[in-house]
Image (cartoon, helix red, strand yellow):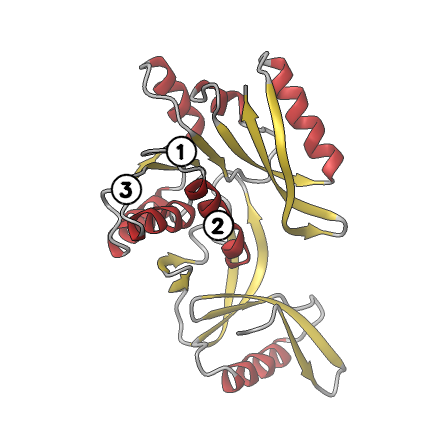
Amino acid sequence: MLKKVFKVSSSYNSMRIPLDVVGDIAILKFARWHPWILKKFYARRFLKNNRHIKVILEKTSGFSGELRVQETKWVAGEKRKDTIHKENDCSFYLNVDETYFSPRLSQERKVVAEEIFASKLRSPSVLVMFGGVAPQAIVLAKLFKKNKLSIEIISSELNKKACEFAEKNVEMNKVQDYVQVVCGDSRKFCVNSASRKKDKFDFILMLRPNLEDTFLDAALKVAKKGTLIYYHGFGEEEKVRNEIERDLKKFGKKYKITEFRKAGDIGVKKFRWNVKIKID
């Protein structure tokens, strides 16, 4: 398995280059001062030492905006940006520039799936907001399918490209009877479902982007007593606690935070948090 930092010695100095590996693509975050020829040297050496990697890209911008897309630049290997990433006995087809996907959340996806499975609810209903290419929905569905149990999962995503990949992934992983991909704004989906008096959900997974809007008001419209919300917050713990308390109190909901755990870092002393909120 590749480490998250690639160390290379050169005449310039000994460098440590952060990276992410998605399928057979390695995305390297070079320093701004690295000249192009040095980047090519690093990339070719990386390919030589890691035969299962076929493409080297340079990360030129982070994920941003409502669609959560990034920008990368080809450096070496095959000239493509699509790949199949495998984790948790699942396969995900995606384009690294057109969709949001983080391999660093692999363990978190597994933990969430196992927790929902352990609830032992009969045919639970699950809404995955901001579902991307549907990795969380599929990991969860395959766990239930493996144990011959039923579950209803809706994966909602705004990015049309991500929806196309999600539908292909649902089919590729053979969980069509478990997962429905809904392309569109997650907030509007919640509002429309509430207006049509559709069934409320047992679990709501809020895999939200790093924006000021918490989207908790939307999630509450399709929550019921006993619903467990998994809320993704960003920054310092106090900030995330305050935004949750502010919005839930604003809408007059009784709740209990049952767990507050780190789900990865996003900067110096700043983290992604997965907060479990039980609606009373």
Query: Residue 212, how many percent across, how many down?
Result: 62, 31
Left or right: 145, with 21 as reference point: left
Mark 2 Cα-neighbour bin, 10 Å: few <14, some 14–19, many ≥20? many
Q: CA distance from mark 1 to mark 3?
A: 12 Å
Q: Which residue is mark 2?
A: 109
**At label 3, which amino acid type do we have?**
Tyr
Label located before the other in sequence (2 or 3):
2
Q: Which residue is mark 3?
A: 178
- Between 213 and 104, the one lying in front of the other is 104
- Between 210 and 123, the one lying in front of the other is 123
Which quadrant holds the C terminus? top right
Query: Which residue is depicted at the point 40% across and 41% down?
Result: 159
Left or right: 243, with 13 as reference point: left
Query: Residue 150, how many percent across, how many down?
Result: 28, 40
Label located before the other in sequence (2 or 1):
2
Mark 3 Cα-neighbour bin, 10 Å: few <14, some 14–19, many ≥20? many
Query: Which residue is depicted at the point 40% across and 27% down?
Result: 201
**At label 1, which amino acid type do we have?**
Leu
- Between 193 and 90, the one lying in front of the other is 90
How many numbered discs sit on the rendered protein?
Answer: 3
Tag shown at residue 127: 1
Q: CA distance from mark 2 to mark 1?
A: 14 Å
Label located before the other in sequence (1 or 3):
1
Left or right: 121, with 111 as reference point: left
Is 44 situated above or below 130? Answer: below
Is 103 situated above or below 64? Answer: below
Is 226 situated above or below 166? Answer: above
**At label 2, which amino acid type do we have?**
Arg
